[in-house]
Amino acid sequence: MSVVMLPLVVLAAGRGGFWWMLLPAYAWYLTTALDGVLGLNEANPDPQTETRALFWHRAVTVVWFPLQFAAIFGCIWYASRAGHLSGPEKLGLFFGLGVLSGTIGMVYAHELLHQKTAVERWMGDLLLASTLYSHFRTEHLLVHHAWVSTPRDAVSARYNEGFYRFFWRVLRQGPRSAWRAEARLLARAGRRPWDRRSPFWRYGMLQGAMVLLALALGGLQGLGLFVFQAFVAIWQLELTNYVEHYGLTRKHLGEGRYEHILPRHSWNASHRVSNWLLINLQRHSDHHYKPDRRFPLLQTYGQDEAPQLPMGYPAMTFVAMVPPWWRRRMNPRVRAWRRQFYPEVTDWGPYNRGDLPMPRNAL
């Protein structure tokens, strides 16, 4: 499903006009419509399946960076020279590319950075650099997976927090949080924050190389289009982050101690087609249970263990962009979740405001 988007990029660049709208129409609306037709897939694969049996599943994630790289930088070169594309048409094209790099590239980067092989991790780093969001690797691995649904995790959306307030908060806090986590990790080994082992050197060099290439191919216009594409991709990623844990909090046990992460702390969706497109990202509880489990083997959970969304992530991110609509759909579900799993908690005010203490020993 991801590879189908590449011919759409070529069509949008070659024909101009409103052809760029095929990209969001395919990734968001067609996927949602097919979810309605084909329904849910609640079957669980054998988690003991050997890695060698997953060759083609792994292959599409590994080869995606060169494909996305060619799409982004090929369009920068083409758009800066094509006389038939107006300014708005170029913005539309690069909005579509941002949908490509956000809906597909970010999800594949997420899968790759959790793996153990050097090739896969490098492909994940390159995908993140192509959207100027390299710090996500540190923030996701060192902070999010350790402290999801606690005050330490910036991308755990609070109850009643609208997406736009959440987005601005994450853009401000995310890079600082990632830097602080790496600095504290280095300090534990007796090293300084600027030690050569810090991944921020790699992040800076990769992102700098992408910026210079955009400038070389398209000048200041090419750089502007590249940055616009990156912003759209980041917006897509953070919309998904917003949906994944909205209002779900781990119980504070006192003195900065929190319960262990459980399936109940992630929103899940078993919608068949959006899970095909998003390589099972919506089986999110199992991903937090076993982060390095490859996407074809992720398990789904019933409502007695994990909360379920009424629609797949593409549809729910669309709802999230209209905060009153989102609160109307999701706040009753969060309150039902609280009654189901935490009937003993009588005061949710500190959870809602993010006033609980930071977890002990958090990076």
Image: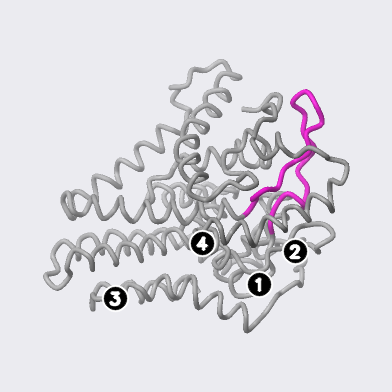
Work out whether mark 1 precedes mark 4 in sequence or the reverse, and give the earlier one: 4
Q: Of the numbered discs in the image, which one, if any, rests on residue 18?
A: 3
Q: Nearer the viewer, mark 3 or mark 1?
A: 3
**Where is mark 1, residue-wise?**
271
Viewer-nearest residue: 57 or 138: 138
Q: Nearer the viewer, mark 3 or mark 2?
A: 3
Distance between the alpha carbons at the discs numbered 4 and 2: 22 Å
Circle 4 residues within 10 Å: few <14, some 14–19, many ≥20: many
Work out whether mark 4 precedes mark 2 in sequence or the reverse, and give the earlier one: 4
**Where is mark 2, residue-wise?**
300
For the residues labelled 3 and 2, say whether their Cβ atoms are less than 8 Å apart.
no
Does dot 3 land on a helix, a strand or a loop? loop
Q: Nearer the viewer, mark 1 or mark 4?
A: 1
Please, what is the three-letter code of the amino acid marked with disc 1?
Answer: His
Please, what is the three-letter code of the amino acid marked with disc 2?
Answer: Thr
- Which x, y percent locates residue 177? 52, 32
Q: Is residue 359 above or below residue 211?
A: above
Please, what is the three-letter code of the amino acid marked with disc 3?
Answer: Phe
Work out whether mark 3 precedes mark 1 in sequence or the reverse, and give the earlier one: 3
* Residue found 75% across the figure and 39% down from its top: 348
**Where is mark 4, residue-wise?**
61
* Residue found 26% across the figure and 55% down from its top: 225
- Which x, y percent locates residue 358? 67, 27
Magenta segment range?
Answer: 244-267
For the residues labelled 4 and 2, say whether their Cβ atoms are less than 8 Å apart.
no
Left or right, 253 with respect to 1, comes to right
Does dot 2 land on a helix, a strand or a loop? loop
Left or right, 304 with respect to 110, comes to right
Q: Is residue 109 above or below residue 359?
A: below
Distance between the alpha carbons at the discs numbered 1 and 4: 21 Å
Left or right, 298 with respect to 58, comes to right
For the residues labelled 1 and 2, say whether their Cβ atoms are less than 8 Å apart.
no
